[in-house]
Image: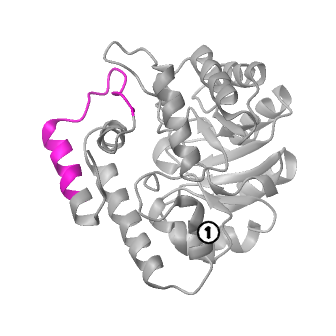
């Protein structure tokens, strides 16, 4: 897999848990097929939506294997390997290798409120030494406690098997400079979904974002809409993405709202794993009102 293979709609799939905290594999396959029907070009296991913090290495590997079996070669499978410690990340790498993941998604050391340039580079040296799999960087200041600079991203790109980045900076100044400088050297995948259409116009290749699961426009059609002159479809889709992002990021503890929203549209997302509690009825009513305003159908 190379940078040209990383494009379009790359959803981070939810991990369906039952009330006992067990993974429901049949529901996972149903969700996988739903995402394929929405035009996924790759599916990410153990991302934020998948409650990566609650998944062991063995569980990640098992989900990759289930996804590979379900995919039957239709789409590549990405797996998240982000962790505070290098030992945990390397355990995830081994699980990905053993179960056939095609590409790895990695933040720097997560939940570390500061990382020096030397510490950052050392982390990726160790990851790269452990695998030949291509890497997609993940820049999420909210999760990491700091942000990659564009200089650091370029250094990592030049020194490792990096094919892209999931860019979750909420600063569009940053996105603009990143795309101008590195957009032709790596696949820049947008994170915040209200940036998806504007970023396509500036050279982004796709998105790993939460919200396109629910839009009227198929996510696989967003590249075409984002790279042509803005029209009514552009404006409607951008508005839906913006409001959905605001909704899902503000209701309950992540990803309770996301799972509740998926359940409402008939997709078996289950409930979050402990310690996150399921969405309350008040939260579900808030999601329903938003869906009503946006014209999103639900059961």
Which residues make up the magenta segment?
Answer: 268-290
Residue nearest the viewer, comparing 243 with 53: 243
Image quarter of residue 264: top left
Above or below residue 284? Residue 164 is below
How many marks overall?
A: 1
Left or right relative to 261: residue 207: right
282 in the magenta segment:
yes
Above or below residue 253? Residue 296 is below
149 in the magenta segment:
no
Q: Would you name the residue on which mark 1 appears?
A: 223
**Residue 243 makes an appearance in the image:** yes
Residue nearest the viewer, comparing 21 with 35: 35
Quadrant position of the N terminus in the picture: top right
Give the farthest residue toward the left: 282
- Give x and y (percent) for residue 167: 59, 56
Image quarter of residue 283: top left
Count residues near mark 1 (Cα–Cα under 10 Å), then give few for <14, some for 14-19, many for 20+. Answer: many
Left or right relative to 286: residue 59: right
Residue nearest the viewer, comparing 25 with 95: 25
- Give x and y (percent) for residue 12: 54, 42
Residue nearest the viewer, comparing 166 with 116: 166
Quadrant position of the C terminus in the picture: top left
As helix, strand or loop, the secondary structure at mark 1 comes to helix
**Residue 107 makes an appearance in the image:** no
Above or below residue 184? Residue 136 is above
Residue at the (20%, 43%) spot, across then down: 284
Left or right relative to 102: residue 222: left
- Give x and y (percent) for residue 253: 30, 37
- Give x and y (percent) for residue 93: 72, 25
Residue at the (47%, 56%) spot, across then down: 212
Residue at the (37%, 22%) spot, across then down: 273
């Amino acid at each position: 897999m190379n940078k040209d293979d990383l494009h379009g709609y790359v959803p981070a799939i939810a991990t369906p848990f039952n009330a006992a905290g067990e993974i429901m594999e049949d529901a996972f396959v149903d969700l996988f097929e739903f995402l394929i029907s929405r035009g996924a070009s790759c599916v990410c296991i153990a991302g934020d939506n998948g409650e990566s913090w609650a998944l062991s290495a063995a569980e990640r590997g098992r989900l990759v294997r289930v996804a590979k079996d379900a995919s039957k070669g239709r789409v590549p499978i990405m797996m998240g390997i982000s962790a505070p410690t290098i030992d945990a990340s390397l355990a995830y790498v081994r699980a990905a290798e053993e179960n056939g993941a095609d590409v790895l998604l990695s933040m720097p050391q997560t939940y570390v409120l500061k990382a020096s340039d030397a510490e950052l580079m050392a982390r990726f040296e160790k990851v790269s030494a452990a695998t030949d799999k291509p890497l997609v960087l993940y820049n999420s200041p909210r999760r990491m406690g700091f942000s990659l600079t564009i200089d650091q991203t370029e250094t990592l790109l030049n020194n490792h098997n990096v094919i892209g980045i999931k860019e979750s900076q909420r600063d569009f100044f940053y996105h603009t400079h990143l795309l101008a400088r590195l957009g032709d050297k790596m696949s820049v995948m947008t994170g915040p979904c209200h940036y998806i259409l504007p970023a396509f116009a500036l050279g982004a290749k796709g998105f790993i974002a939460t919200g396109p699961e629910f839009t009227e426009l198929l996510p696989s059609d967003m590249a075409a809409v984002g790279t042509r002159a803005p029209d009514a479809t552009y404006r409607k889709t951008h508005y839906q993405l913006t409001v959905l992002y605001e909704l899902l990021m503000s209701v309950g503890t992540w990803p309770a709202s996301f799972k509740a929203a998926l359940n409402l549209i008939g997709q078996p997302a289950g409930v979050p794993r402990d310690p996150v509690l399921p969405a309350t009825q008040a939260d579900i009513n808030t999601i329903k009102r938003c869906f009503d305003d946006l014209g999103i159908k639900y059961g």
